[in-house]
Image (tube, rainbow, N blue to C red):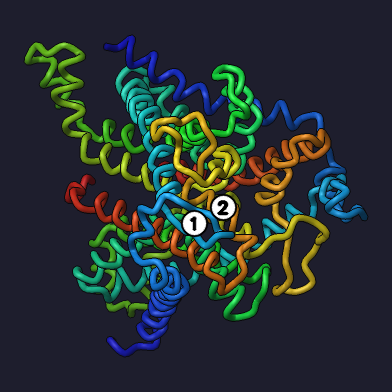
Amino acid sequence: MKAVLILLALPAILLPLACFVYIIIQALPALNWELLMGSNTTSGSLFAGTAGTGHGLWGQISGSLLMMLLACFLAAPLALSIALFHALWASPYQQRMMVILLQVLQGIPPIVYGLCGLIVLVHLLHWGISLAAGGVILALVILPLLSSNAIHALERIPIAQTESAKALGLSVGAVIVRVWLPSAWSSMLTGLLLAMARALSETAPILFTATVFSGITWPDSIFSPVTSLQTHIFYLAQEGSNAHAVDMAWASAAVLLGLVLCFSLMARLLRRYEGAL
Amino acid sequence: MLKSPLYLLLISACMVALISATVLFWFLWDSSWPYWQAFGISQLWAPEWYPYESLYGLLPAIIGTAWAIFIAMIIAVPCGLAAAIVSSEILPRFWQGWLRLMVELLAGIPSVVYGLIALWLLLPWLQNSFDLLTGHSLLAAGMILSLMILPTIMLMSYDALRLIPIEQREAGMSLGMDWNQCLLRILLPQAWPSIRSGILLALGRALGETMAVMLVVGSMDRLPQPIYNILEPAQTLTSRIGREMGEAAFGSMHFSALIACGLVLAVMAICLSLLAQHHKPAVTQ
């Protein structure tokens, strides 16, 4: 029995690790400073197969980060308000409904959010394929994750602390700022970092609502299209015959992976620090 | 206190979130309405999808989705569960923490990166070993999905097993149970509710995964011939939306058929998460 279990478990542990190592090995030859910082507005048409395969990923990196930041700015205040409402005023029935609703929303595939955004934001509101549409859609995708994290963070505060603060005559605002914030900020920040990693790695919802293949390094306004790392990998992956495109695809994958791991590692470290407190 | 400015601020923020979610889903329903009106619910099991001849049957994509999920679960559930048992019951304490950290990080790898790997490693391998035209197939989609949902299953099962107090294991041992009996009679039954919701969560993720599947499934809109043939290109609901959304004109029947695919997907996902809700243990902490 033990032997069978170990045999079954080995691929589960080794295969993902092997994938990870493979990406790094594939990407190493193409990775350098020029690649990260260079822009990629090589002249040339899409049909010639040269557009978007120039040297440089700066446009894609900045596009991804911009969309992620916009999504977090929109979603974080909403998530905080939802969590505070859940903790302060919701009745037990309302609390239960809120948690169920959040989990249902979290289970809905991101591409469905992309479809909704395409109908409402891109077509009905005439925002067009734009940074704003991508940001709002990503905000909706991460909102359930962010809110349930914030709710858990507030629930973990011992009830005795809150009650003694109230007994000392503190107002609601003072309880939030002086008692809850100092003890919950680190787990809320962990949640935010995880949500940022999630927003960076979502591809399907922004594929036809926010991004174009190439030609944009820095968007002119919030209503102009952007390029992003995630969709760049997708487009390049389909150009199998072009060796340069393939190199760029692996390099983009490594950069994206690096960014995502950066955020999720920070989140884990923060969680350890929180455990040590 | 009830009417304090803070209360008004919070409740309006909650309302904004609720209303925007409702509005989005209302438009999902509204845009697919022409499709349901023209063809009716029976399109769910109509076997033909040719947008140029106005045939919009959803059956091929639904069958494709079901096959991909089934293959993924068949591989991922035993492996993930075994990995969880090995890491929580056999590995020494020191390695457990590192393994858990590693699996958590692996769970965060973006799906499009998995797609790239599948395209470059999995497809040529399948092509050679099964002598196929291209490697694009339901089998490839299922295999890459299984790799993506492994971390989810493993993490949930691992946490459930770790939550069982050590006294339980010791009580089992003192009754003369060996390791196997202890595992099958004590540990797994207790951890089962969490393992089950982990599996349902992974199922939901496999259902909605788009990019990796889209790159390897081949996008062929017809039923597998015969129905258990998983070595041919096929189509899933998500890959169809991803492939054809760009070319469907806003307001056309094709567009509303694709929105209908999205609606079917959303309904399936909602059912799954309600199912995962149902039997949750009260509070484990």
Identify the residue shown where x is 80% and y is 46%: A36
User: Looking at the image, can residue A265 be seen?
Assistant: no
Q: Most extreme residue toward the left, as rendered?
A: B175
State the separation of the CA atoms marked 2 and 1: 8 Å
**Quadrant holding the N terminus of chain B:** bottom left
Res B133 quadrant in image = top right
Decide: is A73 above or below A227. Answer: below
* Category of crowding for the residue at label 1, using alpha-carbon neighbours closer than 10 angstroms: few (below 14), some (14–19), many (at least 20): many
Of the residues shown, which amino acid type is indicated by label 2? Glu
**Percent of width and height locating residue B87:** 37, 23
Q: Secondary structure at mark 2?
A: loop
Q: Secondary structure at mark 1?
A: helix
**Percent of width and height locating residue A255:** 70, 42
Q: Which mark is residue A110?
A: 1
**Percent of width and height locating residue A10:** 44, 18
Identify the residue shown where x is 26% and y is 49%: B276
2 and 1 marks in contact (CB < 8 Å): yes
Decide: is B166 above or below B7. Answer: above
Q: Most extreme residue toward the front, as rendered?
A: B53
The residue that label 2 is drawn on is A202
